[in-house]
Amino acid sequence: MNPPPSPIDDGARPSLEVAVVMRRERLHGPSSHWQPWRWTLEAVMPDEPGFGSAPRLLQQDDEVQRWLHPGFKVELFRDDTDGYRLNATTPAPGWFVLWRLEEEATVAAEPIARPVVVTLSYSEAGRWLDAQETVEQVPAPPEVVEWLRTWVDEHYEAEPKRRQRPQSFKPLVDRFGNAASVSTEKKRGRGAGDV
């Protein structure tokens, strides 16, 4: 993949145009009775004009289907440099793809897995997972990782460390965040410890 020549901000966000390959594979064994197929992310690759703009079937046999989904733009946002840094500094930097299974078939006889968003941000992928979305990761090629690391090195600013306020000065709150009060007076009446 040939990334843009320079990650320098020229007013536009640095970005890469990519395509996603999703694979449907036949399952074997006892569980295949209920679920005969499984969808997985196979690859993220440079998008090319010859790919067109609609999903297309690349391979189909009794065991596997492979679908190409072109037209994804991966942008780098300055307010998410920490998420890119987390990905760029991990031992295995990668692409994160959020995908969903179609509710109704659109381009095939049965519903297919459709990529929705592609990112290089570890934090964004984490938010998707927290929202119960299906997110998978595949390795990013070395030239994309280098491009990402260069951009992170130029734009990442560590959060300044803030002095933590001593616990004794923090206001008391209940589990709902409402102000709580503490009393040393003994409670009277039923249910207050008196029997």
Image (tube, grey):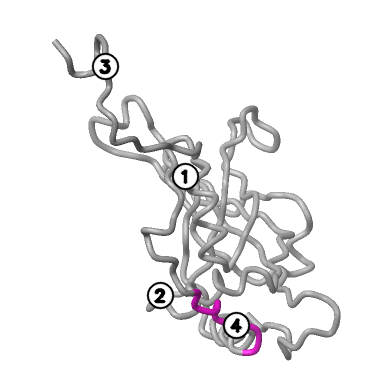
Q: Within 10 Å of the Cα at label 4, are there few (<14), some (14-19), or many (20+) other Cα atoms? A: few
Q: Is residue 161 magenta?
A: yes
Q: Within 10 Å of the Cα at label 1, are there few (<14), some (14-19), or many (20+) other Cα atoms? A: some
Q: Is residue 153 above or below residue 60?
A: below
Q: Within 10 Å of the Cα at label 2, are there few (<14), some (14-19), or many (20+) other Cα atoms? A: few
Give the x, y percent position of residue 176: 47, 35
Q: Are marks 1 and 2 in contact (CB under 8 Å)?
A: no
How far apart marks 4 and 2 lie (CA) works out to 23 Å
Magenta residues, start to end: 154-162
How far apart marks 4 and 1 lie (CA) works out to 38 Å
Identify the element where label 3 is drawn: loop
Q: Are marks 2 and 3 in contact (CB under 8 Å)?
A: no
Kind of residue at disc 4: Glu
Picture quarter with the N terminus: bottom right
Kind of residue at disc 3: Arg
Give the x, y percent position of residue 57: 62, 49
Identify the element where label 2 is drawn: loop
User: Of marks 2 and 3, which one's residue comes earlier in the chain?
Assistant: 2
